[in-house]
Amino acid sequence: MSATKKTVSTPTKKTIQEDHSVTDKLQDSLHHSVDALAEKVGSAEESIRETAHNSSETFVKKQSEIEDKWNKSAVKKYAIENPVASAGIAFSVGMLVSSFLKRK
């Protein structure tokens, strides 16, 4: 941007030249800074989106693996065949953990 000059007439008929070259330089500098920042933020956003997508894929794979292991496990089979005993065991373990946590 080029430096602009403005002529202002005061009540006493004096003419004052206002030089805006400093303001224009500052404005240019700020525009360049904002552009550079926008570019960096854009690349950071892209990186974050890619990482989130990869994490999502990994999470889905792990969830599927855990579900397969659970479906094949003996614990699931026992819980289905003996629901009352499973509930009793879960209750007993809960009481035991609760009593340990109360003591601290």
Image (cartoon, helix red, strand yellow):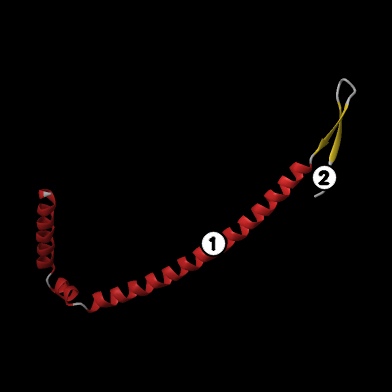
Q: CA distance from mark 2 to mark 1?
A: 36 Å
| Labelled pair 2, 1 in contact (Cβ < 8 Å) | no
As shown in the figure, which amino acid type bears the numbered disc 2? Ala
Q: Position of residue 1 (x, y in %)?
A: 80, 50
Residue extending farthest bottom: 72
Against 40, residue 16 (above or below) is: above
Q: Which residue is mark 2?
A: 3
**Badge 2 element:** loop
Sequence-earlier tag: 2 or 1: 2
Q: Which mark is residue 104?
A: none
The residue nearer to you, when weighing 18 against 80, is 18
As shown in the figure, which amino acid type bears the numbered disc 1? Ala
The residue nearer to you, when weighing 91 against 46, is 46
**Residue at x 39%, y 72% (from the top left corner):** 58
**Residue at x 89%, y 25% (from the top left corner):** 14
The residue nearer to you, when weighing 50 against 11, is 11
**Badge 1 element:** helix
Say which quarter of the image contains residue 32: bottom right
Mark 2 nearby-residue class (10 Å; few <14, some 14–19, many ≥20) = few
Q: Is residue 62 left or right of residue 91?
A: right
Q: Which residue is mark 1?
A: 44
**Residue at x 50%, y 63% (from the top left corner):** 48
Numbered circles on residues, count: 2
Q: Is residue 1 left or right of residue 76?
A: right
**Residue at x 52%, y 65% (from the top left corner):** 47
Mark 1 nearby-residue class (10 Å; few <14, some 14–19, many ≥20) = few
Residue extending farthest top: 12
